[in-house]
């Protein structure tokens, strides 16, 4: 339990720890246009491999699949820490994302195999709450490391922790509940059941689509052949992928029969929107404090504590819930309201407001973020749980990847247009290349407040996106079902789990 909890903590920490370091990184490499890539590269590769990880855990040893993903994650962290250019840092983030693709799903799978069903909500709640803590404290840790050591330690920190996790995992025995047919197959035959063709159709679909979003309007015009070609290629790859999954049936990497399950697809949509909004806020809130209010990285982390503490407190409270749906509904409402109020921040917003608004958002996150996994655990059985968890986690990271790319595009476009209005004599490219913490040093003093205003408005548009995503949760959360945590699944879902392989038996 200690090993997998620490691993999930590190994996999710990596999604937000760079948030407060990003302004310093952009200043170091003069790479403000790459802001979106520092988060998106990690999430794009994570999304690309996420569906495949579910099949790997179904047909191969959970322990060694988990360790393989973890070693890849550690190697990516090493590349990031030693990066000599922005491009190398992005590559390192991509490698770390590949490794993290199997960590959260693997941890939940191992826990499911190791703990009796009546005790799973307690252990799962503890692990997910700890992982959510990583999402919350990531900016604070990143800010402290960036200011008092170096932004590189945001990545080096994974290495000693990784050594400890590896020792713990190698020294224990993990129960295995593979697909029933896996025990009779050779390793080569198991590989044939992974639906690699589906994976090789899915990966370029996601990558082309996200590249188009990242480059559109910045590197290339939206009407350019590069962007149109990427969108068209992604669309046709997606059609081929859907056809492949339809033909593969239950052997597909993403079985369409499972996707049609109401609880599964509503949990996927809910997690997509919630994670997308949360990561957008996590990345641009430190940029607001550093770029608009001019505070140091560590203090920008301290200024996010109201949201962190409220999230921790209400995540614990939600663990005592008898039913998960009410907490999901109330949490979504609080998050949407909190994010909407945060979008009103200015350079002179009083502490009572920037603290209070973050608390509202933190309450929403704490109440509802873990409920989608609990819903899956309470409505499915057998090997269906593993694949469904993979889908939910995949949509979680896909939401982050898509919306960080959207947010980066929105930020860059609004900053340029804002500078043309409020600081027309300032070269927009000079401000962008300087980065969020250094632009004040490269522009005339009499233009600083005008540029701050443009920065503020650009960031607020990213907060609008976060608020809209959180509000969108309310469209889907109702489909998660009204079920007591730890209660028996209904006949339909039990049957679905048994058809998935009956691993519980």
Image (spheres, rainbow, N blue to C red):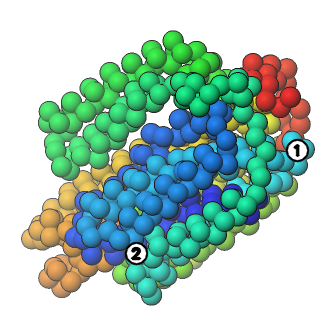
Is 113 in front, or is 445?
A: 113
User: Can residue 282 be seen in this snapshot?
Assistant: no
Q: Position of residue 365 (x, y in %)?
A: 64, 56
Residue 116 is labelled as 1
How many residues crowd around disc 1 within 10 Å: few (fewer than 14), some, or many (20 or more)? few
Q: Residue furthest front?
A: 186
User: Can residue 309 be seen in this snapshot?
Assistant: yes
Q: Is mark 2 on a helix, strand or loop?
A: loop
Residue 487 is labelled as none
Q: Splitting the image into 4 quarters, where does residue 261 fall?
A: top right
Q: Splitting the image into 4 quarters, where does residue 476 fall?
A: top right
Is 443 in front, or is 340?
A: 443
Q: Residue at x 16, y 80 (%)?
A: 442
- First in residue order: circle 1 vs circle 2: 1
Question: Does residue 17 sit above or below 500 in this rendering?
Answer: below
In the shown orientation, is residue 348 left or right of residue 434?
right
Q: Which residue is drawn at 46% across and 52% down?
A: 97
Q: Residue at x 38, y 64 (%)?
A: 79
Is 490 in front, or is 432?
A: 490
Q: Position of residue 372 (x, y in %)?
A: 68, 42
Question: Does residue 230 sit above or below 246 in this rendering?
Answer: below
In the shown orientation, is residue 32 left or right of residue 201?
left
In the shown orientation, is residue 342 left or right of residue 331?
left
Label 2: which residue?
A: 152
In the shown orientation, is residue 328 left or right of residue 227?
right
Question: Does residue 474 sit above or below 144 in this rendering?
Answer: above
Q: Where is residue 211 in the image (x, y as percent from the top left)?
A: 29, 42
């Amino acid at each position: 339990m200690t090993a997998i909890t620490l691993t999930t903590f590190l994996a999710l920490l990596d999604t937000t720890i760079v948030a407060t370091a990003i302004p310093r990184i952009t200043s170091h490499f003069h790479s403000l246009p790459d802001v979106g890539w520092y988060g998106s590269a990690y999430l794009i590769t994570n999304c690309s491999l996420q569906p495949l990880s579910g099949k790997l855990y179904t047909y191969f040893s959970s322990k060694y699949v988990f360790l393989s993903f973890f070693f890849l994650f550690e190697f990516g962290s090493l590349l990031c820490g030693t990066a000599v250019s922005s491009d190398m840092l992005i590559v390192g983030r991509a490698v770390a994302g590949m490794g993290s693709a199997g960590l959260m799903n693997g941890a939940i799978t191992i826990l499911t195999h190791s703990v009796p069903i009546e005790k799973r909500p307690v252990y799962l709640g503890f692990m997910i709450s700890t992982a959510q803590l990583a999402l919350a404290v990531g900016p604070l840790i990143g800010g402290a490391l960036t200011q008092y050591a170096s932004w590189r330690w945001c990545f080096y920190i994974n290495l000693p922790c990784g050594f400890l996790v590896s020792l713990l995992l190698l020294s224990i025995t993990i129960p295995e509940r593979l697909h029933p047919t896996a025990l009779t197959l050779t390793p080569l035959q198991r590989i044939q059941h992974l639906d690699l063709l589906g994976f090789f159709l899915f990966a370029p679909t996601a990558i082309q689509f996200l590249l188009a979003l990242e480059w559109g309007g910045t590197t290339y015009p939206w009407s350019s052949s590069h962007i149109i070609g990427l969108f068209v290629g992604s669309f046709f790859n997606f059609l081929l992928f859907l056809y492949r999954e339809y033909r593969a049936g239950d052997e597909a990497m993403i079985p369409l029969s499972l996707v049609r399950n109401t609880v599964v697809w509503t949990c996927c949509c809910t997690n997509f929107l919630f994670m997308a909004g949360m990561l957008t806020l996590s990345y641009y809130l430190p940029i607001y404090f550093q770029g608009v209010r001019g505070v140091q990285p560590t203090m920008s982390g301290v200024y996010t504590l109201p949201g962190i503490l409220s999230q921790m407190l209400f995540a614990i409270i939600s663990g005592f819930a008898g039913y998960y749906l009410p907490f999901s509904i109330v949490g979504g409402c609080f998050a949407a309201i909190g994010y909407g109020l945060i979008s009103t921040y200015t350079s002179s917003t009083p502490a009572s407001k920037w603290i209070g608004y973050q608390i509202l958002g933190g309450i929403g996150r704490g109440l509802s973020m873990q409920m989608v996994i609990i819903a899956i655990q309470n409505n499915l059985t057998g090997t269906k749980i593993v694949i469904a968890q993979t889908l939910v986690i995949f949509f979680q990271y896909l939401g982050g990847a898509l919306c960080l790319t959207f947010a980066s595009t929105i930020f860059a476009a609004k900053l340029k247009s804002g500078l043309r209005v409020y600081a027309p004599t300032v070269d927009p490219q000079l401000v962008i290349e300087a980065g969020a913490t250094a632009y004040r040093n490269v522009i005339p003093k009499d233009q600083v407040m005008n540029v701050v205003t443009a920065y503020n408005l650009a960031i607020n548009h990213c907060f609008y996106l976060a608020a809209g995503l959180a509000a969108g949760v309310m469209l889907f959360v109702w489909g998660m079902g009204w079920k007591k945590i730890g209660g028996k699944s209904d006949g339909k879902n039990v049957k679905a789990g048994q058809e998935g392989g009956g691993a519980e038996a």
